[in-house]
Amino acid sequence: MKISTQPVTVFLACFQLSWGFSVHNTTELLANMMLFSEEHTYTTEDGYILRMFRIPKIGATPVLFVHGFLGSSDLWLLTNRRNNMPTIFYDEGYDVWLMNQRGNVYSKRHVMLSSDPGNAEFWNFSFHEIGLFDLAATIDHILESTKSDSLLYVGHSMATAALMVLCSQRPEYNRKIRGAVLLAPVAYSMGQSKLPFITLVVNQASFFANIMYKAHTYEFLPFDETRIKLTYTLCASQVSMCSLILKILFRTNIKNLVRDEIPIYLSRLSSGTSVKNYEHLGNIVSPGNNFTMYNYGPAKNQLMYGSPCPPQYNVGSVTVPLALFYSKQDPFLDSHSVAKLKANAPNVILDLRVSDPDFQHLDYLFGINSRPMVTDSILKLIRQMESGVDFRRNIVAKRSPKLGRRTFLYRLRKVIVQNL
């Protein structure tokens, strides 16, 4: 019997070609777009050594971009200069800073601890510590470097939860953030995800985490250059198959992506975090749950918090002006979760559902139409913030005694939307 070797030959040829594919870091991605960058290294209060990248524009308003779960600074830069949100901001005159949270490929060092996957002490963090320590150190480093008294914040996905932690636990940071734009704002539980894969991963987060703990593995989906190249290789030879995977897993509208770049997107989705972060995030977004601190179980909760249940974050103490952008097709949040955030945060100046009915979670980063759908509106909003309008003072000074806070905020949002 003669066995055809053509499929193997084709794959090997593609493999050889794709293995030459370079996994560019943030500095290289920016250099490829003819942009100079700086790398900044600094240490958090609890000893984690973080790396951040800057596209410098001296004297301009600093804007901090914060990635979501499993992300890194790279994810903001995978399309082109005219479509990547940070490079658009730079070209529009802003001083751009790209953060990397503890545990990802750029921020995987500590002054004392090893980042070995089996070192439970290093990986003992979630978005709570990312907000409490990483964001605090990052903001302080930027303000000290630029001699500014405040900055603008743009966060994707889990970056919302981290910001809520920082500003509720350390309220002095509210004044250091002029305004925050939250893209696909993940903090509160969904009604119910329509995707079986997302439902399983979210609702069973503690189950999967406990399996990993028993295996003494505390690092979650780390950055791995070999895996990236293998994924790219497979997807480059089978773009249709990888497109289908994205559609099944994330309800991605393939029409809103550059088809030939799908292998790059899919191969770069994970830069690593902790298992505890995955578990904590899964717990807060599971249907019926609240935005609470990490759940250690009744006995340890009693020791840690003085209560058998973990306490909820006091989002009502977050006074930063917040602009929320969300979409109908997002598999990680829905109208219920956005409504909860709006109900609890006292200074939501804008909540805007993206008009494209197929826009979803990853399109803020990779979508062909992300600029007309989202980025241009953000730029207009931020210019309003820069014009000297203090939305916090507006709420106190301009609210008529006859208007309740929610009525006033509704009218304020209406005026803002009309100007976008």
Image (cartoon, grey):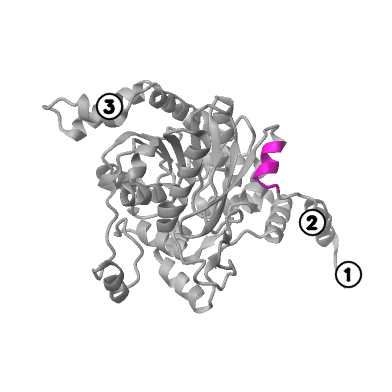
Q: Main secondary structure of the magenta part?
A: helix
Q: CA distance from mark 1 to mark 3?
A: 74 Å
Question: Magenta segment range?
Answer: 24-31
Secondary structure beneath disc 3? helix
- Image quarter of the N terminus: bottom right
Q: Bin the neighbour count of mark 1 within 10 Å (Cα to Cα): few under 14, some 14-19, many 20 and up.
A: few
For disc 3, the neighbor class at 10 Å (few under 14, some 14 to 19, many from 20) is some
Residue 277 % position (x, y): 45, 61
Which numbered circle lies on residue 34?
none
Residue topped by disc 2: 15
Label 2, label 1: how far apart the Cα atoms are: 24 Å
Tag in front: 2 or 1: 2
- For label 1, the residue is 2
Q: Secondary structure at mark 2?
A: helix
| Figure quadrant of the C terminus | top left
Residue 136: in sight, yes or no?
yes
Does residue 177 appear to the left or right of 96 in the view shown?
left
Which circle's residue, 1 or 3, is located before the other in the chain?
1
Q: Residue at x 55, y 24 (%)?
A: 92
